[in-house]
Image (cartoon, helix red, strand yellow):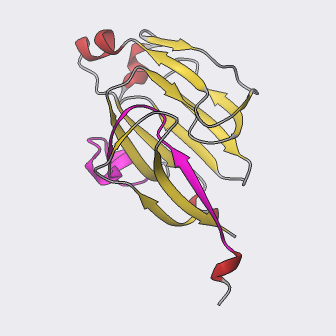
Amino acid sequence: MFEFFKKAHNLVAPVDGKVIDLSQVPDQVFAERLAGDGAAVDSVGDTIVAPADGTLVLIFRTNHAFGITLDDGVELLVHIGLDTVALEGEGFERIAEEGQRVKAGDPIIRVDRELILSKGYSLITPVLITNPDIAKDLKSCIGDNVRAGKDVMISYKTK
């Protein structure tokens, strides 16, 4: 009855590539949505950007993942690659800093694709809403080719 009170929000792609469903990510934690709900990008780009406006609350020590709290209260985790924590930061260059206010499309991390891929790691990049209880009606653009900071990859509603 009160669906019109819900506000629509969009997340842009954090990296160039093709949007895939989380169930297709070859990592059980992401595929089974144990860390949150969302989608992933099978990336072809080397610069990872903020998917929405918010505050960069966490960049992992190894620079392979970061968290943003959005203005609507949604908490995002962008995880660059699979099992890339094992690289202990090699191949990842931090551009932004924790606590920084970011806008959709602002660069956060740059990756050395050749190095990471040469070591046998995937650069599939999950984008997760880690507090999915406040985000409803998640829709992902599965199968779309997206450009970092430009194309919507996930839309959702909040109360």
Q: Which residue is painted at 43% across and 29% down in the image? A: 80
Taking the image as shown, residue 140 lies to the left or right of residue 27, namely right
Residue 78 in the image: above or below residue 155: above
Residue under the image location 58 percent in, 14 percent down: 94
Estimate the x, y position of residue 156 in percent, counting from the top left.
55, 62
Task: Using the image as rendered, state which of residue 133 and residue 137 is in the foreground.
Answer: 137
Residue 61: x and y in percent read 58, 18
Q: Position of residue 60 (x, y in %)?
A: 58, 24
Which quarter of the figure is the C terminus placed in?
Answer: bottom right
| Residue 20 part of the magenta segment | yes
Write the residue at 67% across / 72% down: 6
When the figure is inspected, residue 125 is found, relative to residue 144, above or below; the finding is above
- Of residues 83 and 79, the one nearer the viewer is 79
Q: Residue at x 66, y 79 (%)?
A: 4
Q: Residue furthest bottom?
A: 1
Q: Give left or right: position of 159 versus 113.
A: right
Decide whether residue 33 is among the magenta residues. yes
The image shows residue 120, relative to residue 137, as above or below, that is above
Q: What's drawn in magenta, residue-wise?
A: 6-34
Image height check: is 1 above or below 43? below
Which quarter of the image is occupied by the N terminus? bottom right
- The residue nearer to you, when weighing 113 against 103, is 103
Instruction: Tell me residue 39's x, y (percent).
Output: 40, 49
| Number of numbered discs visible in the structure rendering | 0
User: Is 43 placed left or right of 37 in the picture?
Assistant: left
